[in-house]
Image (cartoon, helix red, strand yellow):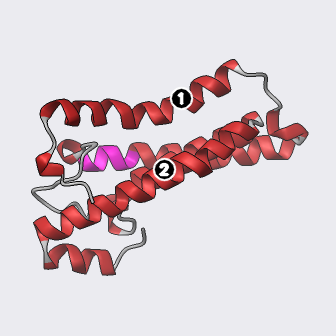
Amino acid sequence: MIDIKSLSSNQRFAINVLVPSLYLFPLVFAYLSPKNFGFGYDGLVYVGLAVGSVGMTLWITSILTLGHSLAVLPGADRLVTRGVYRYIRHPIYTGIILTLGGLFLACGSTICLVYVFVVVVPLNVFRARIEEVVLQEQLGEAYQQYRAGTFF
């Protein structure tokens, strides 16, 4: 497991730049590559856009709910349990996956959908696991109770 406290300021900066760029890369690729909207099925375009819209709404709502507690690296001085965090522990990660998956489904980009499942999903699961270890250490029993009553 990565010890967040032992990272240098340069390593923290690199992570704060690298992780968001892993979400940007497939967006640029999808934008520049030829489109096969909905893989030739109009219905998939609308399904993809609906899933992407739900994801984007969840992502933005989560960011707004976190406010100053938002950070790429895990750590907290308090537990946020209001809004969507009342039900989901990692709504930003869930929103990212839904947004990118829906967009790439609508665009008809097989390679970008594969990227979501091979890179984005494992990255977010890994981030969630690290975050949960750190929050458990920092917040103790309060986090354990919160974790027991919420989904991913």
Indicate whether residue 65 is drawn in magenta.
yes
Is residue 19 visible in this depiction of the protein?
yes
SS for tag 1? helix
Is residue 54 in view?
Answer: no
Crowding near pointer 2: few (<14 within 10 Å), some, many (20+)? many
Which quadrant of the structure image shows residue 68? top left
Of the 4 image quadrants, the one containing the N terminus is: bottom left
**What residue is rendered at 11% in x and 65% in y?**
138
For the view shown, which residue lies furthest in the top direction? 32
Q: Amino acid at mark 2?
A: Gly
Question: What residue sits right under mark 1 in the picture?
Answer: 25
Residue shown at 52% from the left, 47% from the top: 120
Q: How far across and how far down the image is residue 69, in percent?
A: 19, 47
- Label 1 Cα neighbours within 10 Å, binned few <14 / some 14-19 / many ≥20: few
Q: Main secondary structure of the magenta part?
A: helix
Image coordinates of residue 11 in percent, x first then y, are 21, 35
Q: Nearer the viewer, mark 2 or mark 1?
A: 1
Amino acid type at mark 1: Phe
Mark 2–mark 1 CB contact (< 8 Å): no
Please tell me which residue is depicted at 59% across the width and 49% down the height of the picture.
Answer: 118
Q: Which residue is mark 2?
A: 95
Q: Position of residue 58 (x, y in %)?
A: 46, 50
Quadrant in the rendering for residue 115: top right
Disc 2 on helix, strand or loop? helix
The part of the image, by quadrant, that contains residue 79 is bottom left
N-term mark: 2 or 1: 1
Q: Is residue 89 left or right of residue 66?
A: right
- Report the span colored magenta: 61-66
Marks 2 and 1, how far apart at CA = 17 Å
Near-viewer residue (78 or 7): 7
Count of number-bearing discs: 2
Q: Position of residue 23 (x, y in %)?
A: 49, 36
